Structures are given as C-alpha cells and as structure tokens.
Amino acid sequence: MRDSPTPWRHGVVLVCDNQRPQDASKPGCGRAQGRALRSWLKQAARQGGGPGAACRVLNSSCLGVCPEHGVAVALEPGDQIVVVDPATDRQALLDRVQAHMSKPHGR
C-alpha cells in the first residue's frame, strides 16, 4: 500500500447512477439520469470556477437513499446527501456544491 495526495483539494461529489430492475423492492436513481447529471455538474462546476471547479464529480452505485423520483447526490467531506430532480434542480445543486466545497473541512 502506498499513500498519495488527492489531485482534488476541495472534496468529492458522488452522483448515484444505480439502475434497479423494474420489479425491485426499492427504486433506483437510474443510470441515464445519474450519468447525465454528473456530466452536466462536472462541466458547469469547471466553467463556473471557484471551489466547485477543484472538486471531483464521480458516478456512484447506491448511496442508500433510493428516492422514488430524482437522483441522490452525496457531498464529501461531510454528511450531506441531497435528492435532486436532474432537470429542474441543476442550478440549485451547483450552488450547493460551490457553498459546500468552500467550507473548511479540516484539511
């Protein structure tokens, strides 16, 4: 094992893209929705500059929230998971990411 510093200094945003079968007991966020939201957020954060531009935006498997509608997004470091509508909540999510990543997180 070898330690290595992370190339992103502000944090990580995890966007669920878990796809469950239609007959599953819980809903899933959906692969297409999650990946489209991740791509948009990554591009918008970089174009907007600020602390959000320095964070890493990644797809994730299930984050344990499993909303009926929307996509679960975790902001790390920290303990925040938000459920967003990938069509109507994009700007609000970007604003939340910028605010979250500007906070000191003990680094």
Image: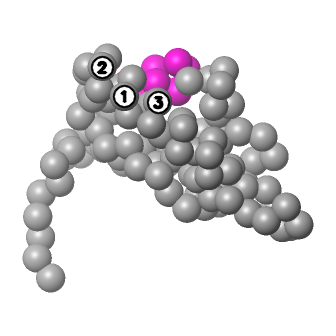
- Between the C-alphas of marks 1 and 2, the distance is 6 Å
Residues rendered magenta in the picture: 91-100
Q: Are the two marked residues, 1 and 2, in contact with CB atoms closer than 8 angstroms?
A: yes
Q: Which quadrant of the rendered structure holds the N terminus?
A: bottom left
Question: How many discs mark residues in the rendered view?
Answer: 3
Against 81, residue 94 (above or below) is: above
Q: Which mark is residue 55?
A: none
On screen, residue 53 above or below 70? above
SS at mark 1 in the image: helix
Q: Report the disc number at residue 43.
A: 1
As shown in the figure, which amino acid type bears the numbered disc 2? Gln
Q: Is residue 94 magenta?
A: yes
Which image quadrant for residue 101? top left
Provide the residue designation for mark 2: 47
Residues at badges 1 and 3 in contact (C-beta under 8 Å)? Answer: yes
Relative to residue 13, is residue 92 drawn left or right? right
Marks 3 and 2 sit apart, C-alpha to C-alpha, by 11 Å
Q: Would residue 76 be visible to someone looking at this image?
A: no
Q: Nearer the viewer, residue 92 or 79?
A: 92
Viewer-closest of 103 and 45: 45
Q: Which coloring applies here?
A: one colour
Image mark for residue 40? 3
Q: Position of residue 51 (x, y in %)?
A: 27, 27
The answer to whether residue 23 of the structure is visible from this angle is yes
Left or right of residue 23, residue 103 in this image: left
Where 79 falls versus 44 (above or below)?
below
Q: Is residue 2 above or below residue 103?
A: below
Q: Position of residue 93 (x, y in %)?
A: 52, 27
In percent of the image, x 29 and y 38: which residue is there? 55
